[in-house]
Amino acid sequence: MAAPAYAAPGPVELAARSIETLLASARQPVLVEPGEPAFALDPEHFHIERSTRWLRLEVWDEHRVLNRRITALRTAGPGKLTLETATLGGRHGQLLLYDEARPQNQALNRKAAQWTGATLLERLLARHFPGYTRHRLSAGADLEHSLSPAFPRACLVRGREAWAAMLAPGEPEAARLVSFALIWHHYLRTQMPHLAWKGIALFLPEGTERQTALRLRHLNPQIAQYRLFAFTELQGAHEIDLTDAGNVLTTLAAASTTPKPRLDPEALLEWSLQQHVQNLDARLHAAPVYSQVQGLTGSQEGLFDLLAADLDGRLTILELKATENLHLPIQALDYYIRTRWHLDRNEFTRQGYFPGIALSPRPPRILLAAPAHRFHSTTEIIAGYFHPDIEVDMVGLGRDLAAPPKVLFRRRLLPGPAESVR
């Protein structure tokens, strides 16, 4: 008697079997629909119902419910599935199901965040910029122009008026948002000079906006207007008043010239410049030069690299990097904000800094120092957005970080082209 012919499973059955197999082996199963936050799957918060035409999948958490009809398995790989969905109106979509615990799936976490961020940005722009057409909405990488895939971005156009927009999807990205937003705005201005570029709109998670607001208040208003929005996943976004965004959260420890032990290239460069600071700028007092001044209690990011005073008593911030760093100008701006805050309140003198030197009330100046071949290509672009009152010099040094510094070039970084902001 002939063996019965094997019947290949249909698309719905194949999808069902694939889902069951993945869920049986996954340690941290996650379900993602493009543009929506991920759902962590556990047996108490999802249900699958079979029919001949589709699988009905329902998943929920404390705030949301997702109900979709799965019609087929689109792709499958180790610990991951892409599922095709259909709505009553006949529109097709997709779901991504994967095991978050697998190291190979870390790229899927980034992809899911990009999906969510780009869709969220589009939704927020439609609400807060009505009447504008959204162009170049993207969450892809553009390494040639130093644009990160972690930050969804867009261009908004209404007539000839245009805005650059960018979103930071989470707290780690919020700290880096301003650097990439300025690069994006510069790129758009150079690509589409026929438009009247009005400003930059930034979106970040609620609770992370203080530092960004402080940075924006120290940028050049003649180059762009700056609008800042704080969002939550469930309640949308609200605009931050940059004129009332809170005080600088910073404390100043008592003066100390005792170096902190460190073993890294920056430490070599810092030690060399501290001992020979007049090689960098003959106008500076040879001593005291303070290393790692505590400017923000409990945070390594709140430490200045070097702080000196010139012969007129004007404070000088020396921001040092031994390796290429895109965020060097913004880190220096953070230090400038804190330094000026304490200077305006006479706290450096009260805490014993620069004994015998009458400090000038003039705003501090910034020296960005690095090996000449180690400045990032965007350093001048970003620093060009600083307020004209902030004096910034870029100083290129020789390669030997331990030797007395040899200056190969010195360049004043001037504010970018002041376009009318209408």
Image (tube, rainbow, N blue to C red):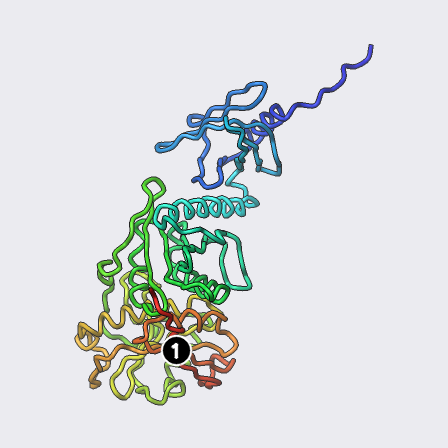
Task: State which quarter of the image contains the N terminus.
Answer: top right
Q: Position of 131 compared to 18: left or right?
A: left
Outermost residue on the right side: it is 1
Question: Is residue 200 among what the camera can see?
Answer: yes
Identify whether 280 is placed above or below 129: below
Outermost residue on the top side: it is 1
Identify whether 149 is placed above or below 75: below
Q: Which of 312 and 347 is in front in this view?
A: 312
Residue 360 quadrant: bottom left
Q: Position of 227 compared to 47: left or right?
A: left
Secondary structure under tag 1 reads loop
Task: State which quarter of the image contains the C terminus.
Answer: bottom left
Q: Position of 241 compared to 21: left or right?
A: left
Residue 346 image point, x, y percent: 18, 75
| Count of residue discs | 1
Residue at (52, 26) in percent of width and height? 69
Query: Can you identify the residue that label 1 sits on?
Result: 414
Q: Which of 122 and 279 is in front in this view?
A: 122
Question: Is residue 176 among what the camera can see?
Answer: no
Residue 355 image point, x, y percent: 21, 83
Q: Would you call the spot at circle 1 few (<14 residues within 10 Å), some (14-19), or many (20 or more)?
A: some
Residue at (59, 18) in percent of width and height? 52
Residue at (20, 84) in percent of width and height? 358
Q: Which of 99 and 188 is in front in this view?
A: 188
Residue 259 image point, x, y percent: 34, 74
Identify whether 180 is placed above or below 68: below
Residue 54 quadrant: top right
Give, as a three-letter code, the residue at label 1: Leu
Residue 201 image point, x, y percent: 37, 56
